[in-house]
Image (tube, rainbow, N blue to C red):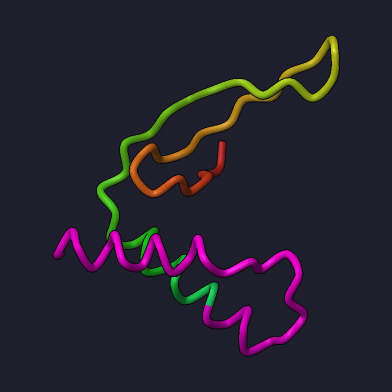
Amino acid sequence: MDSESLKTMIKARDSLNIDFCKEEEYKKIYDSIQKYIHDNCNHDIIIDWVDTDFECSIQIKYCQKCFTTLSN
């Protein structure tokens, strides 16, 4: 896999703001890019903790290369 292609897809994903778009075609494009990144990145997993309130934290896993959040 060409690392430049992966970098380009990460930039494309980051430029799309899926939170505010309701159009199904837009979501399909975003999901397709996300799948490409997930399938082609040689993930370097980071395990971290995020505070949810003053007394509680949850564990998250993400790739430090493509910043994809992965399932726990």
* Looking at the image, residue 71 lies above or below residue 34: above
Q: Is residue 44 magenta?
A: no
Residue 70 x/y as whole percent = 51, 44
Task: Identify the residue shown where x is 39% and y is 60%.
Answer: 10
Image quarter where the C terminus lies is: top right
Majority secondary structure in the magenta region: helix
Residue 48 x/y as whole percent = 54, 23
Task: Identify the residue shown where x is 38% and y is 49%.
Answer: 66
Q: Residue furthest right?
A: 54
Image quarter where the N terminus lies is: bottom left
Task: Identify the residue shown where x is 57% and y is 69%.
Answer: 16
Q: How many marks?
A: 0
- Position of residue 7 in the picture relative to residue 58 (left or right): left
- Position of residue 50 in the picture relative to residue 72 (left or right): right
Residue 18 x/y as whole percent = 66, 68
Residue 69 x/y as whole percent = 53, 45
* Looking at the image, residue 9 lies above or below residue 69: below
* Looking at the image, residue 27 lies above or below residue 17: below
Q: Residue furthest bottom?
A: 25
**Residue 52: which quarter of the image?**
top right
- Position of residue 61 in the picture relative to residue 44 (left or right): right
Q: Is residue 28 magenta?
A: yes
Q: Residue furthest top?
A: 55
Task: Identify the residue shown where x is 40% and y is 62%.
Answer: 11
Magenta stretch bounds:
1-29
Q: Residue furthest left?
A: 2
